[in-house]
Image (spheres, rainbow, N blue to C red):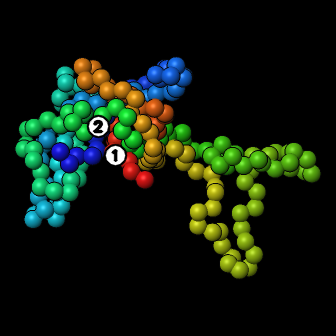
Amino acid sequence: MTINSFYGFKINQFQTFDEKEKRIVVTCLKAQSLLVKQIKNKDKDHYWAYQVAILRDQKSKKKQYLKEIRIKEEPQLKIGDQIKLSTVFKVGDVVKVTGLTKGKGFAGVVKRWGFAGGPHTHGQSDRERAPGSIGMRTTPGRVWKGKKMPGHMGNKTKTIKGLRIFKIDEEKNELWLKGVIPGGRNNLIKISQYTK
C-alpha cells in the first residue's frame, strides 16, 4: 500500500516511561479506520488520491470530516474499503504531524513576540508594554511587511517534524507519539511519514 498519511483526533498528553525506564512525554491520538469515499483519477483530476471520511468514533457517523490522501500510483483500494492505522504505520516510525494551534485572541507584542517593553521611567510609566517605534526614515518611508506587531495570536496551521511512534493500540484505535503536538483536545491531526 502506497499510503503515507493518516488522520486522528488528539485525546491527551501525559508522561510515561520507555523501555529504558526513562520518563518521556507522549501524545495520544484516536485514529479510527478511514473510509474511502471517492477515488481521484489521474486522467480526470490530474492526480491520484483517496478521499476519506474521518470519524471521531464508530457511533457518530454523522459527524465526519472529508480529507484527501494523495498517492503516487494507481489506487488498489475501492470505494467503501477501510484503511487501518496498522497498514500505514508501525511502532518506531518517524513522522510529522500537522494541526491547528490553540487560538488565543488578540495579543500585544509582549505576549505575542516576547518583547521586553519600555522603561518605567523617563516620563513613560504607562507605556511599558508598548511596541515602541515601528517606522523608518524618509527612505523607505513606510513600515516593512512582516513587522512584529500586536494581532491575532494562534489558530494557525503548524507542523512538527521528527516525532517517533511509541505505541499503536489496535483494539482502542489509539496512536501514541513521543513528544507534544499542536492544538487542543479533539483537534483533527494529520500524521505523515517523515524523511529528512
Picture coordinates of residue 150, whole percent (x, y): 63, 51
* 185 vs 174, nearest the viewer: 174
Picture coordinates of residue 60, whole percent (x, y): 21, 25
Please name the residue shown 69% across and 76% down the image.
141
Which residue is situated farthest in the right direction here?
A: 122
Q: Above or below — where is 71 with respect to 63?
A: below
The reply to whether dot 2 and dot 1 touch (C-beta < 8 Å) is yes
| Residue on which disc 1 sits | 193
Please name the residue shown 8% across and 38% down the image.
80
* 144 vs 54, nearest the viewer: 54
- Amino acid type for the residue under numbered disc 1: Gln
Determine whether, in the image, residue 51 is placed left or right of residue 113.
left
Which of the 4 image quarters holds residue 171? top left
Picture coordinates of residue 101, whole percent (x, y): 47, 41
- Amino acid type for the residue under numbered disc 2: Phe
Asked if one can make out residue 132 in the rendered structure from this viewpoint, the answer is yes
Asked if one can make out residue 51 in the rendered structure from this viewpoint, the answer is no
Please name the residue shown 27% across and 20% down the image.
172
Residue at disc 2, secondary structure: loop
* Whole-number angstrom distance, CA of label 2 to CA of label 1: 8 Å
Q: Earlier in the sequence, mark 2 or mark 1?
A: 2
